[in-house]
Amino acid sequence: MAKKNPRTGSTLESLLREEGIYEDAKNRAIKSVLAYELIAAMKTQQISKTRMAERMKTSRSQLDRLLDPDNDSVTLETLKRAAAAVGMRLELELRSET
């Protein structure tokens, strides 16, 4: 019979849930990934922030807010426009909590 590792503890998810910050951490991680993917697409396509803002029909400062993981006031419409500006599309999905 295999020995149980005495250093094994709870998961990060369970710790975040215990602290009551799981949803905030998850939302921040999602926003960070989206921002990273947009920045990567901009680099690949050699699109400057100024040009990206023009493609989105918005301001450079609004684009900076979109790419800032600490700013959680981004709308779905803004995300859709950003994705379209780099030739991508935003897909959302509802899943069961099971």
Image: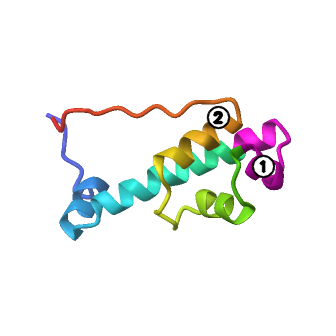
Q: Please name the residue shown 61% across and 41% down the image.
A: 81
Q: Which of 38 and 85 lies nearest the eye of the viewer? A: 85
Q: Is residue 62 above or below residue 45?
A: below
- In the picture, the disc for residue 54 is 1
Q: Secondary structure at mark 1?
A: helix
Report the residue that reaches farthest toward the front.
Answer: 57
Image coordinates for residue 31, horizontal then vertical, percent:
49, 53
Mark 1 / mark 2, whichever is N-terminal:
1
Residue type at mark 1: give it.
Glu
Q: Please name the residue shown 50% across and 57% down the image.
A: 74
Q: Residues within 10 Å of mark 2 (few under 14, many from 20)?
A: some
Residue type at mark 2: give it.
Ala
Q: Quadrant of the N terminus?
A: top left
Q: Secondary structure at mark 2?
A: helix
Report whether 25 appears left or right of 32. Answer: left
Q: Is residue 86 above or below residue 73?
A: above
* Magenta segment: 40-55
Report whether 18 appears left or right of 63. Answer: left
Image coordinates for residue 20, horizontal then vertical, percent:
22, 67
Which residue carries the number 2 mark?
Answer: 84
Whether tag 1 and tag 2 are in contact, CB under 8 A, the answer is no
Q: Is any part of residue 80 visible from this angle?
A: yes
Q: Residues within 10 Å of mark 1 (few under 14, many from 20)?
A: some
Q: Is any part of residue 11 visible from this angle?
A: no
Q: Quadrant of the C terminus?
A: top left
- In the picture, the disc for residue 18 is none
Q: Main secondary structure of the magenta part?
A: helix
Q: Is residue 95 magenta?
A: no
